[in-house]
Amino acid sequence: MPSIDDADHRILRALREDGRMTNAALAEAVGLSPSACLRRLRLLERSGVIRGYTAIIDEPAARDTVTVIVQITLDRQTEEHLSRFETAVRRLPEVRECYLMTGMSDYLLRVEARDAADYERIHKEQLSRLPGVARIQSSFAIRRVLGRAG
C-alpha cells in the first residue's frame, strides 16, 4: 500500500463529495496537473485505497424504513468465533453495515427494518441466532442528522 500524502488525502476528500467528477475537475479541485492527478488516482485504485465507485440511491421505499443501531457482544472473542459471526452476518440483507469494535460490545450493526414489528422478527429470527451471540442491545434512530442512505 502506498504512503498517503496531503495531495492523496485531497483527492480522496474530493471523490467522497463527487465520485463522478472528471479528472480535469478533480485536478483543479486538489491543485494538481491533470496528468499528476490521474497518476495518483490510478495508484490509489491499484493499491486498493480506492476500492470502487458507487451510486447513492435515494429510494422512496428506503425512506419508509426504520434504522436500528445494534450492539452485539459475543460469548467468546477468538478468531474462530469472530470469523463465524462475520460470515453469518454478511448473509443478512437487513444488516447494512457491520463494524468490529473496541469497548463494551464486539460489533456495531446498522439494521434497516420496515417498522418495529419487522425489527422484532429480525431480532428473534436472525440476530439472536447468529453464532456466538451473548448479548444484543438495540437503539432505534429518530432521524438522520448526517450520513448517506444506502
Image (cartoon, grey):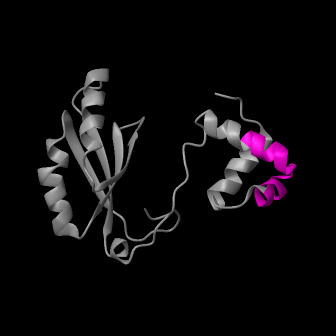
- Position above or below: 24 against 100: below
Q: Nearer the viewer, residue 119 or 31?
A: 31
Q: Residue at x 66, y 55 (%)?
A: 15
Q: In the image, 3: left or right of 139?
A: right
**Where is the N terminus found, in terms of image quarters?**
top right
Q: What percent of the width, then of the height, locates residue 56?
A: 49, 64
Viewer-nearest residue: 115 or 60: 60
Residue 11 percent coordinates (x, y): 73, 49
Report if residue 117 lies within the magenta region: no
The one of 47 and 100 positioned closer to us in this rendering: 47
Q: Quadrant of residue 28?
A: bottom right
Q: Magenta part of the protein: which range?
A: 24-40
Residue 4 % position (x, y): 72, 35
Residue at the (40%, 73%) spot, across then down: 59
Q: Quadrant of the C terminus?
A: bottom left
**Residue at the location (27% across, 56% down)?**
94
Residue 53, image x and y in percent? 55, 53
Residue 103 placement: quadrant: top left
Left or right: 126 in relation to 59: left
Q: Residue at x 63, y 58 (%)?
A: 19
The answer to whether any part of residue 78 appears in the image is no
144 lies left or right of 61: right
**Mainly helix, strand or loop, the magenta region?**
helix
Quarter of the image holding residue 7?
top right
Q: Is residue 73 above or below residue 83?
A: below
Left or right: 112, with 143 as reference point: left
